[in-house]
Image: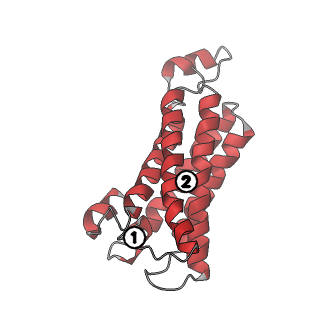
Amino acid sequence: MLTLHAEAGLDPMHSVISEYAFQATGWLLPASLTLFAAGSALIAEALRRAGMSRWIVVLLLAWGTSMFLIGAFPTDRPGVPLSLSGGIHRYAAFAAFLMMPVAGLLLAQAKIRYAKAVRILSALALGALLMVVVPYVVRMFGIPLSNDDIPAGLTQRVVVVTELGVLALAGLSMLNPLAAQRSQGGVSPVLA
């Protein structure tokens, strides 16, 4: 994903991430989204084994499924009417953008390691998601608004980065060696 951003030359302030699919190295977008999905599935399984709530596990698996769908169904080129593929892409992205902050808030409530950071990142993701959704609502009322008029790329990137941060902290919460030693005595390595 970082290579794609560095080499494509799109304006990260106004170009949404999905537009990278139309660049020469666009194949990196579905590849990175598939890797995010796989990572989410592995972290979900680790949390399940550690005794985390089923809701958290289901949300992480659903987020991963959404990431896979976002990569498998590319969006439409700018200015083209919404196709079936573009619709699946759009709604899978919205679902993913909503699911990870909810999973993060549940993780923080479960008092995993890094719970405070997870809570902050989840709140930032929800706030940025609101900023992503507002232009769509404005357009629904017939007010013309393009990505050049708003920082659509920036707000979308804030959502993605904060959500990947939540996922990374969920995974890192499983790697505490001291907690793992305590788990042999019955304490979950996720909690600390």
The image's colouring method is secondary structure
Farthest-out residue, right = 54
The quadrant of the rendering that contains the C terminus is top right
Image point (55%, 60%), residue name = 67
Residue 73 coordinates in the image, percent (x, y): 55, 74
Is residue 5 shown above or below 184? below
With 111 as the anchor, is 21 left or right in this view? Answer: left
The amino acid type, in three-letter code, at marker 1 is Asn
Instruction: Decide: is 141 above or below 80.
Output: above
x and y percent of residue 130 in the render? 53, 54
For badge 2, the amino acid type reads: Ala
Q: Residue 192 carries which label?
A: none
Q: Residues within 10 Å of mark 1 (few under 14, many from 20)?
A: some
Q: Mark 2 points at which residue?
A: 38
Q: Which of marks 1 and 2 is in front?
A: 1
Picture quadrant where residue 146 is located: bottom left
Q: What element carries label 1?
A: loop
Which SS class for mark 2?
Answer: helix
Give the mark count.
2
| Front one among 162 and 4 | 162
**Which residue position is annotated with label 1?**
147
Q: Position of 126 compared to 53: left or right?
A: left
- Residue 177: percent from left, percent from top: 49, 22
User: How far, Cα to Cα, is label 1 from label 2?
Assistant: 31 Å
Tell me where residue 152 sits by quadrant. bottom left
